[in-house]
Amino acid sequence: MPSNLNSISVLMIGTSLPAAVKTLEALLPPNQILARPCDLEALMEETFTLVPAIILCSQPPEGISLIEVAQLLRMRFQNSKILFITSQREGFERKSLQKNGFDDAFLMPIDSTVLQEFLKDELAKISQGAIRTFRSVKLMDLEAGEVLDFDTFLFFPMNKKYVKYSASGDSLDKDQTKKLAKHQVGSVHVTVDQMQKVYDFTAGRLKKLGAATGVSETEKRERIQGAVRELMVGLFNDSAKEGTIEQGRAVIADCQGIVKSYITNSGKDSASWYEKLLNLSGSDANSYSHSGNTATYAALFSLGLGIGDPEQLAIAGLLHDIGMVDVPEEIQLKRESEWTEEEKNIFQKHPEFSVSLIKNRNMIVPEIVMKMIMMHHEKVSGGGYPRGLAGPKFLKEAQVLGLANRFDELTALVEGKATLTPKQALDQIKADSLDNPSIASFDPEIVNKLVAMFSQGNPTESPESTL
């Protein structure tokens, strides 16, 4: 296998792939990123100086069989990772594509962040250390004072730096771990190539604790993300633009399964409400983790505030951003400050897109779930979107979903963006809603009650400034 960046190349076949190009250009020299048209005969005959380690294939021209493309590429490049990337939703069947030659398939733009993670992880494996990628591991899954056989790191997102916290063969320092907990830091990071050691460690720890069938919090979050991805791409796995009633019921059943397996059942333990919230915050961010996190926060907030039904809030959280699939990829890859007025208007329609998709796919949900999804970006001051609702027209249940959405945005780990602790996030939400009522997002009574529920959280410092 290649052991350095100079011996790695990536081949892109077909039309432009913005999310992939953005990631690859940050990691590889331009001459190692190859672009070719979807000409199968030419590809079979071309001699490559470097055999592509990864091949990205977009939708082939009309008249060319996608399955034939996959099979020919697999014959020609037996050891390469071959990926299919498309924005054509209808007929997208990920599992079928994997069975017919592709290692994985990605539906744009909803899979953009997952594709970027996949490329980084694969290049990290291939480069044998020249590129490093990391995964967050919940501190509650590790035992202070017990020897770990993997390195751990602290991530400082504003500086985009990972700083070693403990070395393989060392134990986590109990005092330092307490300090992290004091500052509401719930995770450390581990390089992707060491994650199997993490799974082995947590499995052994759970067994010692008498929970042989238990799942660590780290693995639980990964399972939720995987389940949410299967749910989302499953919305578009037939050729019809409108789903049947049976298909709609199946999707909702999947939603309910995710909610009951990972969210509301565990959330019924009121004694651990606060701990569960702290354990979830500070997660790595992508579109699927955001949906899962928002669903979990919404259910927890519902339980704590006594507003709405936790299961309905969780389902709304899972589905609140499915309309992002109708927001062009080039808009999603830009910062908000870079949008034109037209792009901003398109983005702000995504709640309407979400509701339209739910209706078109015959997903029968309570009317309140539809209203929560439609309203989750509204503001009590009337300055939200898509309809500019104000005061009591912005339903309390929708405000709980909006709070969950905002809370995850503030606490998720995103490179180049300051990540807030849960208390800092609530303080920010409180300031936004109470300091200037003319632009307030949420009902002050709801915000104050939520802040009061965090009374046991006392740190105010950012971990980056204190560790």
Image (cartoon, rainbow, N blue to C red):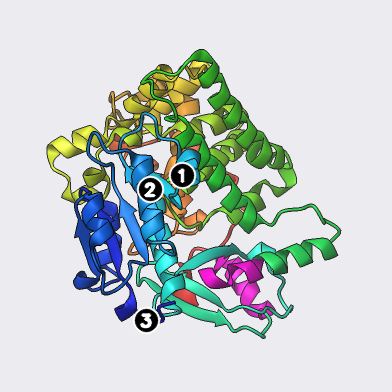
Q: Is 320 placed left or right of 213 in the picture?
A: left
Q: Is 457 placed left or right of 51 in the picture?
A: right
Residue at image point 17% right, 45% down:
339
Residue at image point 51% right, 35% down:
231
* Quarter-of-image position of residue 387: top left
Q: x, y (%) of residue 148?
A: 68, 78
**Among numbered discs 2 and 3, the one appearing first in the sequence:** 3
Cα distance in 3D space between marks 3 and 1: 31 Å
Mark 1, Cα crowd under 10 Å, few <14 / some 14-19 / many 20+, is some
Query: As rendered, which of 191 and 52 lies closer to the eye?
Result: 52
Number of numbered discs overlaid on the protein picture: 3
Q: Which residues are magenta?
A: 172-198
Residue 224 in sight in this render: yes
Q: Amino acid at mark 1?
A: Asn
Q: Magenta segment: does it hold 188?
A: yes
Q: x, y (%) of residue 245?
A: 51, 14
Specify the quadrant that holds the N terminus.
Answer: bottom left
Residue at image point 22% right, 46% down:
330
Which residue position holds label 2?
Answer: 70
